[in-house]
Image (cartoon, rainbow, N blue to C red):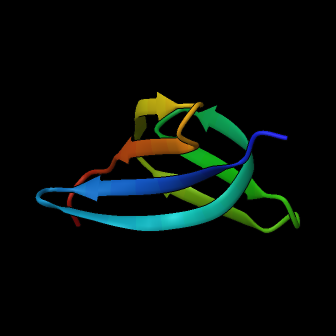
């Protein structure tokens, strides 16, 4: 099973959005993340980096 930790990057900061992400959907200007337990998080932004070997996904998010 391939699960990932998803990080969002805003300006110079990076924070964990979701651990154990099992599904990722790109929906226009947002990304919908679903973890192994079915919890969903929607983040405005775009995927900038995916490392499946390291189980890392990074999102570029607009600054608030």
Residue 49 figure quarter: top left
Rendered location of residue 7, percent (x, y): 43, 56
From the viewer's perspective, is 56 left or right of 59?
A: right
Q: Looking at the image, is 61 positioned above or below residue 54?
A: below
Quadrant showing the N terminus: top right
From the viewer's perspective, is 37 left or right of 8?
A: right
Residue under the image location 58 percent in, 43 percent down:
55
Q: Residue furthest front?
A: 53
From the viewer's perspective, is 46 left or right of 20?
A: left
Rendered location of residue 31, percent (x, y): 56, 44
Q: Tally the numbered discs.
A: 0
Q: Looking at the image, is 9 positioned above or below residue 55?
A: below
Rendered location of residue 22, percent (x, y): 77, 47
Quadrant showing the C terminus: bottom left
Residue under the image location 49 percent in, 42 percent down:
57
Residue under the image location 70 percent in, 59 percent down:
20
Residue under the image location 54 percent in, 32 percent down:
28
Rendered location of residue 18, percent (x, y): 59, 64
Q: Residue furthest left?
A: 12
Residue 47 figure quarter: top left
Q: Looking at the image, is 7 positioned above or below residue 26?
A: below
Residue 39 figure quarter: bottom right
Q: Looking at the image, is 37 positioned above or below residue 52?
A: below
From the viewer's perspective, is 28 left or right of 46?
A: right
Between 42 and 2, the residue placed more toward the observer is 2
């Amino acid at each position: 099973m391939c699960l990932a930790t998803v990080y969002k990057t805003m300006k110079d900061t990076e924070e964990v959005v979701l651990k154990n992400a099992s599904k990722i959907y790109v929906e226009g200007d947002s990304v919908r993340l679903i973890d192994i337990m079915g919890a969903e998080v929607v983040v405005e932004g775009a995927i900038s980096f995916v490392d499946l070997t390291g189980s890392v996904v990074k999102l570029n998010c607009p600054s608030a």
